[in-house]
Image (cartoon, rainbow, N blue to C red):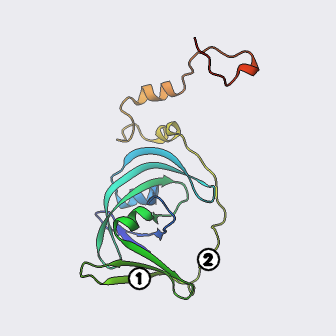
Amino acid sequence: MQVYLGEEGHEIMELVGTGSELNIIPEDSEIKAGLTTRCLIMNLRGIGGHCTSIVGLAQFNPITLVTGEERDIHLFVAIGAVHTVLGRPFLAYNNIRLDFSQQKGEIFSYIKPDGRRLCLPICSPQKVGWREGPPAGMETCAISKLEYLKELPKENESWPKNQDNFVENSHQVFDSEEVKDSKDKGKIHEE
């Protein structure tokens, strides 16, 4: 579905899905749309077993639907080859339904301020690219907070204020009593 995101109305094609627990946007689209984000590092595992690295959260951003109506959205910023997804949080917050029929495809519907329900077809079985199977070519990935922060320019607001200590301490190995006997490994020792 085509939407316009951010203050400047950056045009973007979004997937709409009731299966997604998050609203997701790729990092390059987030930059193009000029969204304000805060740093948030985590890895998500999708239903197909693939992993997506989340590196930020863009909150309270305006999104304009093709009908011209503006809504608010929170988007998790992902790196890698991901699509922009409007998930359950957006649908529930805005009282939007997805209806599906084998003949008409997928229909995006919501109640307008005047009380009428507006229905927009967003995916049709007659269009090229209609698939009922899972996506092909899934990759697995993982990113650590340290790996991501090392790639950021140091003047970036997302970088921790104690950035030098953070990087130095992340590689530090603390000495501890080593368990010499392999049968004791994994047991808790009290002193």
Name the kind of residue labelled 2 in the image: Arg
From the image, tell me which residue sits under label 2.
131
Res. 5 image quadrant: bottom left
Q: Earlier in the sequence, mark 2 or mark 1?
A: 1
Res. 143 image quadrant: top right
Q: Which of the two residues, 168 or 133, is positioned nearer the viewer here?
A: 133
Quadrant (top left/top right/bottom left/bottom right) for the N terminus:
bottom left
Q: Residue at x 36, y 61 (%)?
A: 33
From the image, tell me which residue sits under label 1.
120
Left or right, 2 with respect to 182, comes to: left
Q: Which of the two residues, 79 or 104, is positioned nearer the viewer here?
A: 104
Quadrant (top left/top right/bottom left/bottom right) for the C terminus:
top right
- Label 2: state its secondary structure: loop
Check whether the beta carbons of the residues at disc 2 and disc 1 lie within 8 A of each other. no
Q: Which of the two residues, 125 or 101, is positioned nearer the viewer here?
A: 101
Instruction: Count every numbered label the image shows and give the total.
Output: 2
